[in-house]
Image (cartoon, helix red, strand yellow):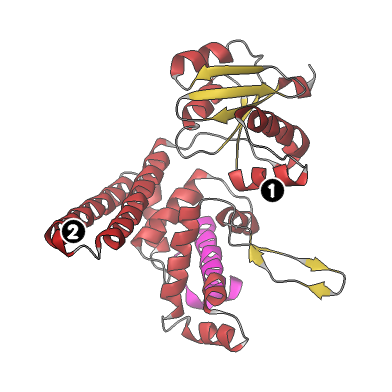
Amino acid sequence: MDHKQSVYGVDVSAAQLVIGRYDSEALVEIGNAPEPIAAWLTSLRRGSIVAMEATGRYHQLLAHLAQAAGMLVYVLNPQGLKHYARAVGVRGKTDRIDAQLIARYVVHERNKLHPWAPAAPETEALSQLLTRRQKLVNARQTLMQSLSGVSALKSEREALRATLKRMITNLELLIVREIARAPELAQLHRRLVSVVGIGPLVAAGLVAALARVRFSRVDSFIAYTGLDPRPDDSGNRRGRRRLTKHGPPLLRSLLYTAGMAAAHSKLFRARYAELLARGLQTTEAIVILARKLARIAFALYRSGESFDPRKHLRTA
């Protein structure tokens, strides 16, 4: 079987899937629901490749059903696909273009991609709780800023603030309870909170990431966080490094928060001051600390140890 003919790119939305096959102009449109997806999958040969962008939750049904049907599933980073589209000169953006671009990307870049696999149920539940909490935090910030200048709604604004705060607190309790349900996750969480700068919420985000994807090397984990710098060099010119920002934005945000806490801690204060003295901006210095904390977290995950500054600061 020609592997190119067995690669399907799927543009996913809340209501429908637009499916394109590599080297074919034909498109298939089906509903994003169990019955039409299952019917379409039965028309494919087992082992066919089904690829899609990560779209929050809308791609998850297709990914789970395709994997259960014996297909090789790839869930692609939207940022990477966006850069690929620019590199190959794709000018427009339609459902057809997106579906065919996904199939083309997988055919040409497959050796750099990792097949998708479903997360353990407890890890999936933890990730969803963390995402929902972050959405509430963002919504609270947006609403409070929007209503801040409306004096006639002051009492309603304060009542809304209190309600949202209570909901966020309840979600944090659910996160703690979800971790406690799985002894292995609970043990990892306890080891991670022993690291200066990493609080319970940041540790929960790290637990969800480390237990979900089996990283073979620390550099793979750092790349997953998106905290790895992208070089911009040419000849003798050394350009400014910028973060790749691949991977989950929430995890990157949590690690940045941990970096901020570490910067003002007794253990990391001198290192932070040293980075600033070298001419780095505040954000750059905090990112370096966040990356160091991510490396320490990976070391604790792999070794089963608790944080030992004398050992882990040196090895990270």
Residue 92 among those drawn in magenta? no
- State the SS at label 1: helix
Residue lying at the far right in this picture: please name it. 235
Residue 120 is at least partly visible in this image? yes
| Quarter of the view holding residue 187 | bottom left
Which residue corresponds to mark 1?
83
Determine which of the numbered discs, if any, sits on residue 32 in the image.
none
How far across and how far down the image is residue 224, in percent? 58, 53
Q: Amino acid at mark 1?
A: His
How far across and how far down the image is residue 306, in percent? 44, 65
Q: Is residue 277 above or below residue 258?
A: below
How far across and how far down the image is residue 114, in percent? 65, 40
Residue lying at the far left in this picture: please name it. 155
Given residues 273 and 249, the one toward you in this image is: 249
Q: Amino acid at mark 2?
A: Arg
Q: Is residue 32 above or below residue 304?
A: above
Q: Residues within 10 Å of mark 1 (few under 14, many from 20)?
A: few
Residue 311 is at least partly visible in this image? no
Residue 289 among those drawn in magenta? yes
Q: Mark 2 and mark 1 in contact (Cβ < 8 Å)?
A: no
